[in-house]
Amino acid sequence: MEKLLEVKDLHVSFDTYGGEVKAVRGVNFDLNKGETLAIVGESGSGKSVTTKALMQLIPMPPGRIKQGEILFEGRDLAKMSDKQMQKIRGKEISMIFQDPMTSLNPTMKVGNQIMEGLIKHQKMSKPQARKRVVELLELVGIADAENRMKQYPHQFSGGMRQRVVVAIALACNPKLLIADEPTTALDVTIQAQILELMKDIQKKTDSATIFITHDLGVVANVADRVAVMYAGKIVEVGTVDDIFYNPKHPYTWGLLGSMPSLDSEDEELYAIPGSPPDLLNPPKGDAFAARNEYAMKIDLEQEPPMFKVSDTHYAATWLLHENAPDIDPPAAVKKRMEGMAKTSGGSEGEQR
Amino acid sequence: MTRYIIQRLIYLVITMILIATLTFFLMKFLPGTPLSAADKLSEEQQQVVLEKYGLDDPVPIQYFNYMVNLVQGDLGISFQFDNREVSTIIMERIGPSMQLGVQAMVIGVILGMLLGLVSAIYHNGFMDYTSTFLAVLGQSIPSFVFAGLLQFYIGVKFGWFPVALWEGWEYTVLPTASLAIFPIAIAARFMRTEMLEVMGSDYIVTARAKGVNKVGVVFKHGLRNALIPLITVLGPLAISLMTGSLVIENIFAVPGIGEQFVKAINVNDYPIIMGTTLLLSFMFIIIILVIDLLYGVIDPRIRLAEGE
């Protein structure tokens, strides 16, 4: 497997009147060619900021990449100027956004919005670009492309607009596609369609994908590997199987336990108590300790390092230390894990 | 689209008739008669004059006669200004006013938008503070103060442009400059606010994510979306500028419509009052129509169904 992207010790901060908000505090991950990595976590955990920082799309100022390296095919994106980034954005890395209702320019024809990247990056003439736009719109499942490309975003439904956003992202065959909660703003049936579309396209184009979501159901459906983020850090990373069937971090337990499932009727959903820490003054030790019923003394003193569970699976919790007591996930979460193991007997594609 | 314009033009006619009616009767409530100043005339002489102009008829008859003439395009003759045709007097006077107004508007909007754009792009930087400061000054200091300063420094001290009167293009420079200050300030402030808001919206991030450069983001994606609120405020401003500024016309001795209008009201010159009011209303309605059509040009969401 060839590495496409390596993020090393990435720190992103926002300078506000109240002080420095440390939104991302030392994130490490890598991504192979053609692989899909899901980043999950609750609101404010730094998922979006991390990926926006990859493309230098965070507003700077007040945001800044404080330290760390973003190696994309060996080049460090963190040190690139805006001019240099313009050649990478949309061409080698592109992004699908959360809300299709606001992420298209309301005063520009849809076709022109897709064409822009083609003309800039691939130096296409207008007729060439127009031909490619028709292909792209057909690829993302928009019928009557010739006419639709001359329309404005308000003439499209939400799901259709998201297809257009996907087409914009795919226009130049990027090596890396970042999807920032691409289905969150859509209703459930449309969500399934867009997910199916993205999986389909990935098969055809073989681009690597970073998929940000807080919907674990989506993760099981699309990802190869999962990174769980909490308070600006990755707390657990592993393959989909590692995370769903053998989670090690109490926060991951909480996330899994709070996910409703269809096959059990009267079970209560598990809720993680408390709220995420204030990143203006991140707590000492493990940021999750205050909400963690298994927290130990050391959690309040020192940050846990990444413990290795297997070659693919790492988690940052002191529970994995050799001196820690052996603790099982809560019963509700355990039941959930068993349930998932049962339903996913090799037919992942069907659970939509 | 054509149907819409025709519909609007029909409304225009109805509105004009209403305005004519209302103005006619309100005008009759003004104290005095056109002869108030003519106290040297005897009762009989006054009676003769009133009869000659039909002013001794009951008001409804006068109204009827006026409307019949109006529909035929006859605005009547002036009582006070050498009995000349009202249309001739207005035509002479509207030219300078409109020229000043249009010049001030064009310069004001272009400069103001540039200032506002610079402000938005260098948000919270030196350029932003400078241009915001200028905009606040321009909006809060009355135009006659600028007019006086311009006359003194540029007109008298440096002698670059004539101080007053209306004898050629160079005479328009100072009044235009004084008139333009306000639209510059308004355009700059609105442009800045709108542009800042637009630049923070999701589709701007989408554009940047496509690799569009800074200039492209601002002009191709930002500007058009920021224009709608600007046009909304600039419309009425354009009207008030083009229909003549009483103050500026007086300071620079410009023979414009604003000055004429006020004179006519003071001496109860009914036909001139009517004619001027109708002309200004007409311009007002037309400009509003143009603005409504402009909305559609700028924002496709406002565009009217084109029966396709």
Image (spheres, coloured by chain):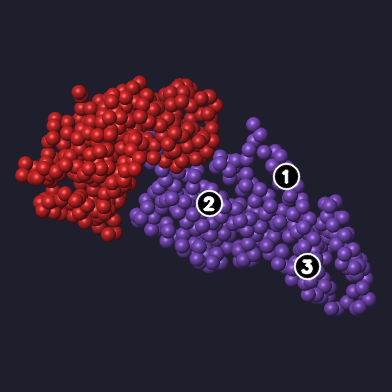
Chain colours: A red, B purple
Residue A218 seen by the camera: yes
Q: Which residue carries the number 2 mark?
A: B230
Residue A46 position within the rendered picture, expressed as x and y whole percent measured from the top left:
27, 45
Q: Secondary structure at mark 2?
A: helix
Tell me whether marks 1 and 2 sit on the same chain.
Answer: yes
Residue B95 seen by the camera: no
Q: Residues within 10 Å of mark 3 (few under 14, many from 20)?
A: some
Q: Which mark, by number, is residue A16?
A: none
Q: Quadrant of the C terminus of chain A?
A: top left
In the rendered structure, which amino acid carries the disc numbered 3?
Met
Q: Which mark, by number, is residue B27?
A: 3
Tell me whether marks 1 and 3 sit on the same chain.
Answer: yes
Q: Which residue carries the number 1 mark?
A: B7
How far apart marks 2 and 3 lie (CA) works out to 35 Å
Q: Secondary structure at mark 1?
A: helix
Q: Secondary structure at mark 3?
A: helix
Q: Residues within 10 Å of mark 2 (few under 14, many from 20)?
A: some
Residue sitting at the far left? A323
Front one among A93 and A228: A228
Which of the two labelled residues, at mark 1 and mark 3, occupies the earlier sequence position? 1
Residue B193: quarter of image: bottom left
In the rendered structure, which amino acid carries the disc numbered 2?
Leu
Front one among B206 and B77: B206
**Callout 2: residue from which chain?**
B
> Disc 1 or disc 3, which is closer to the eye?
1
Tell me whether marks 2 and 3 sit on the same chain.
Answer: yes
